[in-house]
Amino acid sequence: MRAKRMMFGAMIALVLLVAGCVGISSGPATPPFAETSPAVTTAPAATEAPGSTEAAPTPDPAAPPAAEAPAVSQEPQTTATVDAAVTAPPTTAPLPTAPPAPTASAAPTETPAPTAEPVAPTEPAAIACVPGALTPTQTEGPYYTANPPETNSLFQPGMNGTRLLLTGYVLDQACQPLPGARVDFWQADAAGVYDNTGYTLRGFTLTDAEGRYSMETVVPGEYPGRTPHIHVKVTPPGGATLTSQLYLPDAVANATDRIFSPALVVEIAQGADGLVGSFNFVVAGR
Ligand SMILES: [Fe+2]
């Protein structure tokens, strides 16, 4: 009987022990699950933010500095730029087709500026002549000697006076040169004296193919009543003889000479060996 009581008591104690264990494990279990559940829902949002491109436009005070966010997003752009640089046409390609910039070498295409004076005309100087204006005739005077020598120089060695080279043309009324015209000169010497026994300072010449003549002589001197002058006879081939006189431009006695004519003044220039006188005769042709 006593053993039964002890068995019964042990059973009760075991029941109570089991009951107590069950009550401890089921009571306080709910609170810990309720606290951990919110942590699970927020975790995914935190992991998506760095990779999301939509988070960038909405600045968050808690977010990292704005300067850093673009740095991450610019990396793809930099890559795209590099890719574009590789695939796009080179920017230097159009340059060869563009017109070359003007350089110093283009200068020769421009019209060269004149660097020299115009070339002087090679045509002969115009002949001073007025058509139809015959050379005035004048008196022969008392000192002409027939049959003078043909020469182009009346000057002789040792002759006193200023040397004078007379040149010019013999022309017809139309101012055309007369080749082969005879031009006969006689004159006084530098002292105003004629050689009436010989042919000193007397002689004639013929015009050349261009109608030009030349005679070397000396400047004549004055004698009483006359300014310095040179007598002349011009005879064109087959034509009438023109008798006249020539004068010097700066002779003082020209103003008082009764025969002097300005139309018969020689144009004088200084030459290497003396004076050079120019005068064109215009005579009636054949
Ligand atoms: Fe004379």
Image (cartoon, helix red, strand yellow):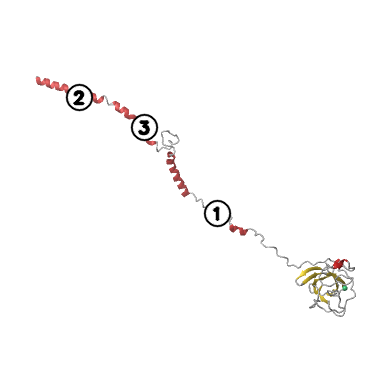
| In this view, the mark in front (2 or 3) | 3
Distance, label 2 to label 1, CA atoms, is 101 Å
Relative image position of residue 141 (x, y in whole percent): 90, 74
Q: Residues within 10 Å of mark 2 (few under 14, many from 20)?
A: few
Residue tagged 1? 97
Q: Residues within 10 Å of mark 1 (few under 14, many from 20)?
A: few
**Along the line of sight, which residue is nearer the eye, 222 or 169?**
222
Q: Secondary structure at mark 2?
A: helix
- Report the side of 32 relative to 180 (left or right): left
User: Which of disc 3 and disc 2 is earlier in sequence?
Assistant: 2
Distance, label 2 to label 3, CA atoms, is 40 Å
Task: Please tell me in which quarter of the rendered image ligand 1 is found.
Answer: bottom right
Which numbered dot is residue 42?
A: 3
Relative image position of residue 122 (x, y in whole percent): 73, 67
Residue tagged 2? 18
Relative image position of residue 149 (x, y in whole percent): 83, 79
Relative image position of residue 233 (x, y in whole percent): 86, 74
Relative to 269, is 108 above or below? above
Extreme residue in the bottom direction:
197
Q: Amino acid at mark 3?
A: Thr
Distance, label 1 to label 3, CA atoms, is 63 Å
Q: Amino acid at mark 2?
A: Val
